[in-house]
């Protein structure tokens, strides 16, 4: 495990999921591609491009594995991460620079849930009375919800200092939800969520706010890179 930690830190690429930091657990991760399925669709991910790979039934963070696991096309992915370049949208190798890239986390299988993550996330934006959101003028074909902080709040939480951007499909369903920090201007980080129902997967993208204007192209390009890895 120590070698994995050192290599991950060297490339400054840590994937933080709702279940904690996810690390690749397979013995031969440096020499074998990762094969498996997303909702019965077969995928093969290049070993030198993806990291932090987890499959259904893998031990959780902090638990050691027992024996060597054999993967097949029937093995179901539940989490993995990779990087895409900008503005060319090519799949990056782990050894390449992570400057000016889009960081991608795929959540599926046991971690996917009921498929209503986007709906719930939008419905709960005003759950904290001290940090409320009001809809303002749309931008980049996204509904824009601006943060309003209650006057009783003495010190603003940087973890809550973000605006929210939402895209609804023709039926009104939330198809993309993006949270962008407000404290660093265009260098602030945006976290962009969307789902691919065909693969029963949730995709989380992280990129600089300066790229928000290209959110739709970033989303479609990410889907294209995934489609290219189907078998």
Image (tube, rainbow, N blue to C red):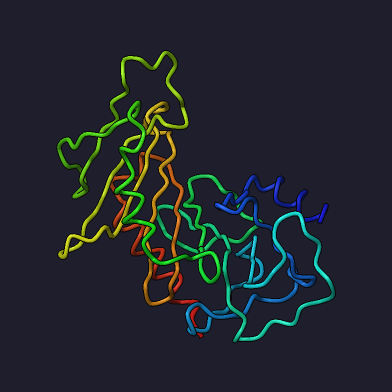
37 or 63: which is nearer to us? 63
Q: Give the residue displayed 71% in from the left and 46% down from the top.
A: 10
86 or 19: which is nearer to us? 19
Which image quarter is the N terminus in?
A: bottom right
Please provide percent x and percent y for residue 15.
59, 52
- Is residue 41 placed above or below 207 in the rendered structure? below
Please provide percent x and percent y for residue 215.
32, 52
Tally the numbered discs.
Answer: 0
Q: Give the residue displayed 20% in from the left and 62% down from the top.
A: 169
- Is residue 7 placed above or below 139 in the rendered structure? below
Residue 164, picture quadrant: top left
Q: Is residue 29 left or right of residue 218?
A: right
Q: Is residue 119 left or right of residue 206?
A: left
Please provide percent x and percent y for residue 184.
42, 27
Please provide percent x and percent y for residue 202.
44, 63
Q: Give the residue displayed 39% in from the left and 58% down from the top.
A: 117
Q: In this view, does 38 lie to the left or right of 152?
A: right
Q: Give the residue displayed 47% in from the left and 80% down from the top.
A: 39
């Amino acid at each position: 495990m120590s070698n994995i930690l050192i290599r991950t830190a060297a490339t400054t690429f840590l994937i933080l999921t709702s279940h904690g930091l996810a690390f690749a657990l397979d013995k031969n991760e440096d020499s074998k591609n990762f094969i498996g399925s997303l909702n019965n669709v077969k995928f093969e991910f290049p070993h030198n491009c993806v990291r932090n790979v987890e499959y259904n039934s893998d031990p959780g963070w902090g638990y050691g594995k027992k024996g060597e696991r054999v993967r097949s096309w029937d093995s179901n992915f539940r989490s993995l991460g990779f990087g895409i370049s900008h503005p060319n949208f090519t799949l990056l190798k782990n050894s390449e620079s992570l400057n000016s890239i889009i960081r991608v986390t795929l959540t599926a299988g046991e971690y996917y849930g009921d498929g209503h993550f986007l709906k719930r996330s939008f419905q709960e934006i005003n759950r904290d009375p001290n940090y409320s959101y009001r809809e303002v003028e749309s931008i980049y074909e996204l509904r824009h919800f601006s943060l309003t902080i209650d006057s009783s709040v003495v010190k603003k939480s940087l973890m809550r200092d973000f605006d929210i951007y939402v895209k609804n499909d023709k039926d009104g369903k939330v198809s993309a939800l993006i949270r962008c920090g407000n404290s660093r201007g265009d260098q602030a980080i945006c976290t962009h969520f969307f789902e691919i129902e065909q693969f029963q997967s949730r995709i989380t993208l992280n990129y600089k706010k300066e790229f928000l204007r290209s959110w739709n192209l970033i989303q479609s390009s990410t889907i294209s890179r995934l489609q290219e890895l189907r078998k």
